[in-house]
Amino acid sequence: MLLQPYKGFFDGKGLGDTKKIFKERRNKMKKLKKRTRSMGIAFLFAFWLWPALGLAMDNGECLDCHNDEGLTREQGRGSLFVDAAQFHDSAHHGQGIMCIDCHADIAELNYDNDVPHAKNLAPVACSSCHEAEQDAFANSVHTQISSKGITMTCYACHDYHYATPLAAASVGQRDNNFCAKCHNPYQSHDWLPKKEEHFAFVECTVCHVPEVQRHIHLKFFDLVTNQFYKGEDILAILGLGSDQFMPMIDTDNDGTISRPEFEILELMLRQKNVHAIFHAELVAEMAPVAHQVMRGGAERNCEKCHTAESPYFEAVSIVLTKEDGGVDHHQVDRGVLKSYSLSHFYLYAGTRVKLLDMIGILLIGGAGCGVLGHLAIRIVTLRGRRQKKEKS
Amino acid sequence: MSKKLIYIHPAPVRVWHWIQAAGIVLLVLTGFQIRYAEMVGIMALKNAITLHNYVGFVVIANYFLWLIYYLGTGKIKIYFPDLRTFVPDAFRQAKYYGFGIFKGDPNPHVMTPDNKFNALQQKAYLGLMFLLLPAQMISGVFLWRVKGYADYVHYLGGIKIIDTIHVILFFFFAAFLIAHCYLATLGHTPLAHLKAMFTGYEEEH
């Protein structure tokens, strides 16, 4: 395991001397300030209603400087560039978080200075909002390694400005963007059979965070294009709004898509010429406890999953992303895992098709009964054969 | 009673047979453990999967031992029934197993080195060795490396379809084991065929 203390640009090292760049910015800002002032009482009234904007610092003002790809700190190490488009798609922006909500020590911008705010900003305190996550992380192996001189920050795993919602993310997206940054799972799972399959279908935290809730995600996957359908695409194909999906599919209104209802959904998609398969993955619920990765606490009991009534498969959901960036989880009867509707998902013992068991009973039982019956007749007729033999 | 010994099972066939026998028994046992992990307690699931994989490859290698021997010696023809006489031969053999054997009638099929299988055996082993066992081996290899053979698995309809083929054949082989062991007791003495499979010699009566 190789972990390095993350050298981010929010680590309190300061922004440095970027005089040349900021001279240009300062002039630009002065012009902008004048323009802002001239926008009149209506805007001022709006600012008065919104305390954050009342500081006359919205994200746009920050991005006026930070959208420059060449903006770096004095030492030339670490970009200070923020991609506005990517930030717009981030989870934080989706929640209406402003730059100064995290960079809380920026009280005002002074464009007379080379750098309009303090050069040395305080590290961002993620835990001021993510308190529960911080508590879980404090009990994790990633905090314990500080005794070895390794400091893990939030930024080591999570993007600075581009943290995206993960509720609908696939196992690959979840693991590759987090655990796989430092860990190569093939180097530490010698005991695990079928590594490649496990790593492809099971999120790391499912086994490595004993307390986390697990569920099966069902997503629509097109084998021809080798891509997942977006939830909004599926809804558009079905001609349904996100709030119309369940009323249309869950015809008995019990809040769960039963096996017959699931089959009707498949039929509806085929009628629309969509030949997607249901791709199933075992993922962890997006909850603060997912940060509590334990040393030596990983689940190694195969039978925990590989059993017909595994608690890991109690929750099965169709995951649909929406145009507004939200995610809907629609509960599905776990019985679909044992059906041919999910012909591309199977785990030993866990998703047995009952029909096959009945065929097995008939074949083995038939052979056994046939043998016993034949043997019984042989025993009963033994005397007759002996007499015939003696006569001959 | 005359006791003429005829050499029916050459050494390579006997070696192949007993490797196959041990392999199929182990595969069936570990197969039950894998499919019914919560009900069967022979061994841990992890060990069962590992053993199943290793034994599976031994059985695959053993299949090629069988194929090379029978193709190389030309004896492969004993697996192919004579179509001109197959139907009456099979009927006569079925009648013997279902009726004549209880009366003490002689077996209508006389075993010779060049014709050791009766019509029913030929039909059963032909399907077994040229269709069912290869299908089981191929589906087993796909299940061994689902990701590695993902394209083939998807093309054939998905892992659950491959699993269905493998599981139905698994049940078939489990049932076959029972029937095979019982049928092996139908020689002139209950242990005659078993003994011959060790020594290579059958007694002709």
Image (cartoon, coloured by chain):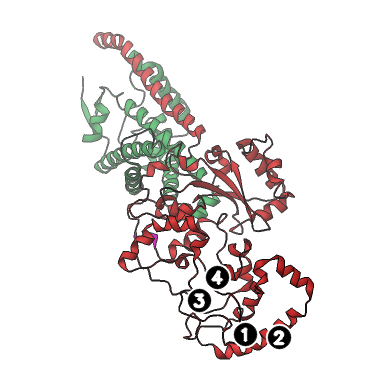
Chain colours: A red, B green
The kind of residue tagged 1 is Tyr
| Alpha-carbon span between mark 1 and mark 4 | 18 Å
Query: Do the dots labelled 4 and 2 sit on one chain?
Result: yes
The dot on residue A121 is 3
Q: Does the CB distance between marks 1 and 4 fall below 8 Å?
A: no
Estimate the x, y position of residue A193 in percent, counting from the top left.
Answer: 37, 50
The disc, 1 or 4, on the residue closer to the chain's N-terminal end is: 4
Q: Distance between the residues labelled 1 and 2?
A: 11 Å
State the SS at label 4.
Answer: loop
Residue sitting nearer the eye, A385 or A91? A91
Q: Which range of residues does the magenta coloring cover?
A: A183-188
Q: Specify the amino acid type for callout 2.
A: Lys
What is the number of callouts on the image? 4
Badge 3 or badge 1: first in the primary sequence: 1
State the residue at coordinates (56%, 69%).
A161
What chain does mark 1 sit on? A
**Which disc number belongs to residue A31?**
2
Identify the residue position indicated by label 1 in the image: A111
Dots 3 and 1 on the same chain: yes
Residue A280: percent from the left, percent from the top? Answer: 53, 49
